Image (cartoon, rainbow, N blue to C red):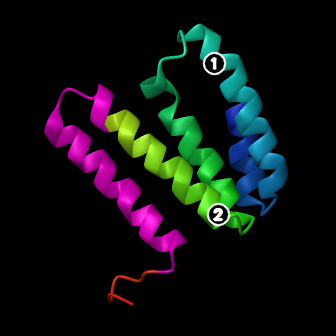
Amino acid sequence: YKSCRNLGDALLKMGRAEEAMGYFQKGLDIKAPLVGNDETMMADDKIRICDCLGAMGRKDEAVAMLTEVVDIINKTVDDKDLAGLLTLGIAARIAELKGLGSDGE
């Protein structure tokens, strides 16, 4: 699983988002049975897939998946301050995908 994730990270940094997404998905497929399909344990991997989708111009898909990740965090993270912090970071990613700048554009 970690090898797939590391390879995906390297490919994404090299601008090879489609290949990277394949490795992230493969890592997720390996990890899912190991963590009992615990959505919280898979949220980070889903965020990486969203980064690939965004890089490939599939921004609506990325936003939809990130919205699912926010729902997962809100349902499963007991510490509401931590949940708020995590979702704030994801909200920034969503705004970036939607083309909203920090200046309110």
Task: Tell me the quarter of the image containing the N terminus.
Answer: top right
Q: Position of residue 10 (x, y in %)?
A: 73, 49
10 Å crowding of disc 1: few (<14), some (14-19), many (20+): some
Residue 86: within the magenta? yes
Q: Residue at x 69, y 65 (%)?
A: 55
Question: Does 47 sit left or right of 79 as displayed?
Answer: right
| Identity of the residue drawn at 25% across and 40% down | 83
Is residue 90 part of the magenta span, yes or no? yes
Which residue position holds label 2?
Answer: 54
Q: Residue at x 73, y 34 (%)?
A: 25
Q: Nearer the viewer, residue 12 or 29?
A: 29
Q: Looking at the picture, which amino acid does disc 2 mark?
A: Gly
Residue sitting at 66 percent across and 27 percent down? 28
Residue tagged 1: 31
* Amino acid tagged 1: Lys
- Total numbered circles: 2
Disc 2 on helix, strand or loop? helix
Q: Tell me where residue 70 appears, x and y as whole percent.
A: 38, 45
Residue 87 located left or right of residue 62:
left
Q: Is residue 60 above or below residue 32?
A: below
Residue 76 shown left or right of residue 67 in the figure: left
Q: Which residues are magenta?
A: 74-99
